[in-house]
């Protein structure tokens, strides 16, 4: 989701999607405006995941403080970065996330503090693997405790191969399948981004469980084009 409009988030929930990725890496949304997107997600029964800007501790903590049920962290390249993400997203003894109970995730302190600190560690940690450095270090990344999912970023992966945007190029597909098989070998949940309906069955069959389909503005554009084309006939 890149528009920043909670209505799009709410509609996605009513349409039956399982989760929504609220994008602060490429989207224009501030952490303040993001709170209403999380509210919209919860109202319509869809899981709000925030894709943070980077793997800085403060950005991860803020996303979780406002009530995201998971963080998706871009450009992870090695085990050290993966470990830092886990520490930033978990409270002691599983990490060192900054402690504050006067946040939306703790109902602004209305929630029992100990229940909050226990339940907060159930939030999802999703790491994006997007380049050759990550592939080189995938075995050590897969050994990091506390990571819930790995996510393949096909567009950045295509760029790292010198063919930016060619996400269906056999070279990109080969490396995506390599990551999927590595993850399955370690019983790790794997995800990826797709922007065509025919790819849903392909990657589900390959074992991908966390499928992120297109972008709100892209879906809206396709729907508008369909209407325009129908009107021309």
Image (spheres, helix red, strand yellow):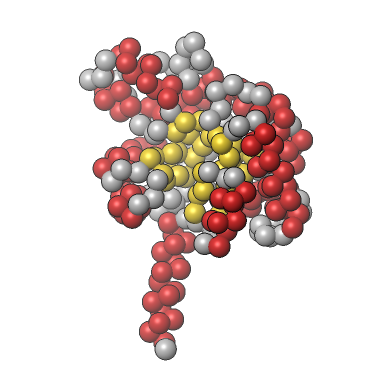
Can you say whether 179 is above or below 197 in the image? above
Q: Position of residue 173 (x, y in %)?
A: 70, 53
- 117 over 180 or under it: above or below: above
Relative to 168, 27 lies left or right: left
Q: Residue at x 65, y 36 (%)?
A: 183
Front-most of residues 2 and 157: 157
Q: Is residue 208 above or below residue 194?
A: above
Q: Is residue 117 left or right of residue 161?
A: left
Q: Which residue reaches farthest bottom?
A: 233
Look at 41% across and 69% down and name the residue there.
223
Position of residue 92 measured from the top left corner of the image (x, y, whole percent): 47, 12
Residue 192, given in percent of the width and then of the height, sits at 57, 47
- Give whichever of 21, 54 is nearer the camera: 21
Q: Nearer the viewer, residue 107 or 53?
A: 107
Q: Is residue 135 left or right of residue 9?
A: right
Q: Outermost residue toward the front?
A: 205
Is any part of residue 178 visible from this angle?
yes
In the rendering, at what x and y percent does residue 104 appear? Answer: 30, 28
Q: Is residue 74 visible?
A: no
In the foreground, 111 or 209? 209
> Residue visible at 40% across and 33% down?
69
Q: Residue furthest left?
A: 110
Q: From the viewer's perspective, is 97 left or right of 188?
A: left
**Image quarter (top left, top right, bottom left or bottom right) of the C terminus:** bottom left
């Amino acid at each position: 989701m890149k528009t920043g409009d909670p209505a799009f988030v709410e509609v996605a929930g009513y349409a039956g999607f399982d989760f929504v990725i609220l994008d602060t890496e490429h989207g224009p949304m501030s952490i303040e405006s993001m709170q209403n997107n999380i509210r919209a997600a919860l109202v319509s029964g869809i899981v709000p995941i925030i894709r943070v800007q980077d793997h800085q501790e403060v950005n991860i903590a803020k996303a979780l403080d406002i009530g995201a049920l998971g963080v998706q962290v871009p450009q992870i390249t090695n085990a050290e970065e993966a470990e830092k993400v886990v520490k930033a997203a978990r409270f002691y003894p599983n990490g060192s996330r900054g402690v504050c109970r006067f946040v939306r995730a703790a109902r602004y302190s209305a929630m029992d503090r100990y229940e909050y600190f226990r339940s907060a560690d159930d939030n999802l940690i999703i790491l994006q693997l997007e380049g050759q450095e990550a592939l080189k270090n995938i075995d050590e990344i897969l050994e990091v405790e506390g990571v819930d999912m790995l996510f393949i970023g096909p567009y950045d992966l295509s760029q790292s191969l010198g063919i930016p945007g060619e996400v269906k190029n056999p070279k990109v597909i080969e490396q995506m399948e390599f990551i999927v098989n590595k993850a399955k070998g370690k019983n790790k949940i794997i995800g990826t981004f797709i922007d065509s309906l025919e790819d849903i069955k392909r990657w589900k069959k390959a074992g991908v469980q966390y499928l992120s389909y297109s972008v709100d503005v892209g879906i809206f554009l396709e729907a508008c084009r369909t209407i325009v084309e129908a009107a021309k006939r």
